[in-house]
Image (tube, rainbow, N blue to C red):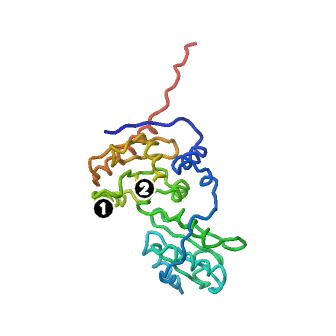
Amino acid sequence: MARTGQAGTMNTSIFLCLFIILLTRGSPAVCAGDNSSTSHSTASTAEKPVLLDNVADAEAFISGAEVAVIGFFQEPESSEASQFLLTAGRIPEVPFGLSTSPAVLSHYGVEANTVTLFRTVDNQRRDLDMNNNDIDAEKMTRFIRINELRLVTEYTPMTAVGVMQSSFQLHLLLVTDKTSPKYPEQMRRYREAAELFKGKILFILVDINLKSNDRTVSFFKLKKSQLPALAIFNVPDEEQDVLTLDEVSVERVQDFCNGFIERMEKGEDEPEEKAPSEEL
């Protein structure tokens, strides 16, 4: 059973700020770009970053992962590079590369002491300039966690910022229980559907076991008894639609997305009603 609704005429930029606050349990620090430390883990024994000596190696490294991070340094023994190595140990699931090659730096248009995150979901990159900035492993970790959008991005207070700063206008949320025995199959099908809309819709996973996601469920007027469910949201005009599911399938997700897009396009094509002209 689907239901549709449209929010009011609140200014979009204000709405995005409030939306982030709402879905991150009302913490205005997130919207304000709070740079407080969020990770207190110590460096792990993860492999050191891959040394990238030429452009071909760098391109292959970037294309080989949904999210890849490269540190561009002139001096590999610098304090900035040391902080980069420390960060790499804290995030073992993200591949890290390091390059001191002038040709590689020139190819990507960066200066020395720059950390760049590359992602395939929208073919975009995010740069963190470490020159003349007090950037340490804590802030670098936050930078990566905020911007590591994937084919399916799990929604957390940290990734909420990256989601709202992305170029995607359409966001599709799968609201479900990650502890359910059905979850692995749900995710497999959801990822398969995400491939069909790559570059058009940002697919997001909302785990109801994460306390900070309680407000996400209530925002879309969903009850836990109605899950799993899909919720789609169009950022520019704040239009939304919700679909509760018996099971997640590629076809259901595809039909839901296509139906929403068609309704939006139809609404844009409808001419505005003109007031009747008075006869003179």
Amino acid type, callout 2:
Ile
Identity of the residue drawn at 51% across and 41% down: 237
Where on the picture, by quarter, is residue 222? top left
Residue density around tag 2, few if under 14, some if 14–19, many if 20 or more, within 10 Å: many
Q: Which residue is mark 1?
A: 184
Mark 1: few, some, or many residues within 10 Å (few <14, many ≥20)?
Answer: few
| Element under disc 2 | strand
| Residue 40 against residue 45 in the figure, above or below | above
Q: Would you say 131 lies left or right of 213 here?
A: right
Residue 269 position in % (x across, y down)? 44, 38
Q: Residue at x 48, y 67 (%)?
A: 119
Residue 29, position as x, y percentages in the image? 62, 53
> Looking at the image, which residue sits at the far top?
280
Q: Is residue 149 above or below residue 226?
A: below
Q: Are marks 1 and 2 in contact (CB under 8 Å)?
A: no
Judge depth for marks 1 and 2 and give the one in front: 1
Structural distance between the alpha carbons of marks 1 and 2: 15 Å
**Which residue in the structure is indicated by mark 2?**
204
Rendered location of residue 33, percent (x, y): 63, 57
Q: Secondary structure at mark 1?
A: helix
Amino acid, disc 1:
Pro
Identify the residue at image location x=66%, y=84%. 78
Indicate whether 147 appears above or below 220: below
For the residue pair 194 and 144, the one nearer the viewer reads as 144
* Image quarter in which the C terminus is found: top right
Q: Position of residue 232 (x, y in %)?
A: 41, 47
Can you tell which quarter of the image residue 85 is in? bottom right
Q: Is residue 100 left or right of residue 60?
A: right
| First-in-chain label (1 vs 2) | 1
Q: Where is the N terminus found, in terms of image quarters? A: top left
